[in-house]
Amino acid sequence: MHLSRIKVPDFRVLHNVDIKFEKEFTPSVFPLGSQNGGGKSTLLQLIFTLLHCSVVPERLHFLKNILVGFKAGNDRKVLAIIEIWDGEETYEIEFFACNDSYIKKLLDQNKPGAKSDSKDYKFSSLPKLESIERKIARSENDLSSLEKLDAEQDFLNEIEDA
């Protein structure tokens, strides 16, 4: 998985942020710079929290923590749009905050026979999100396996050196 783009319209000190990470850039290290208080840490926390905490119930308190003081208003407010490339396809995931009345409106639009006069979200994208979640889980498992192999190799090297 490769983070290919992050867009943040308006979150804390971040306004109209649009950063693209080139796939071909080697090494895959991207320096970010700004003044103190410019939002570097906020950007990293937002990316990490949205990608790693928003889909795991045990981690939702981290998401709630980063959203303290965030106001969605009467509708929905986009937190960030993140593009992820899996080596074959790019997925765009839009994270937004909203109030209960917005969710009720979405659910009402998805009732059989309901007319939709907007281009709002439908819940048909859930299978695609589940596919992305599975790929992320496989990547995390692969990383965990590699870390175990590294630890075993380090142990064997220590035995050989002794």
Image (cartoon, rainbow, N blue to C red):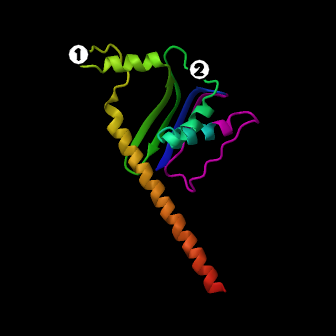
Percent x, y of residue 46: 59, 37
Q: Give the range drawn in magenta.
A: 13-42
Q: How many marks?
A: 2
Mark earlier in primary sequence (2, 1): 2
Which of these two is toward me, 158 or 83? 158
Identified by mark 2, the residue type is Lys
Query: Which residue does the numbered mark 2 point to in the structure image?
Result: 71
Q: Characterize the local packing of mark 1: few (<14), some (14-19) or many (20 or more) Cα atoms within 10 angstroms.
A: few
Q: Is residue 14 magenta?
A: yes
Tell me which residue sits at (56%, 75%) in the image: 153
- The image quarter containing residue 70 is top right
Tell me which residue sits at (59%, 20%) in the image: 71
Q: Characterize the local packing of mark 2: few (<14), some (14-19) or many (20 or more) Cα atoms within 10 angstroms.
A: few
Query: Which residue does the numbered mark 1 point to in the structure image?
Result: 113
For residue 67, above or below residue 113: below
Kindly state the secondary structure of the residue where label 2 is placed.
loop
For residue 110, above or below residue 154: above
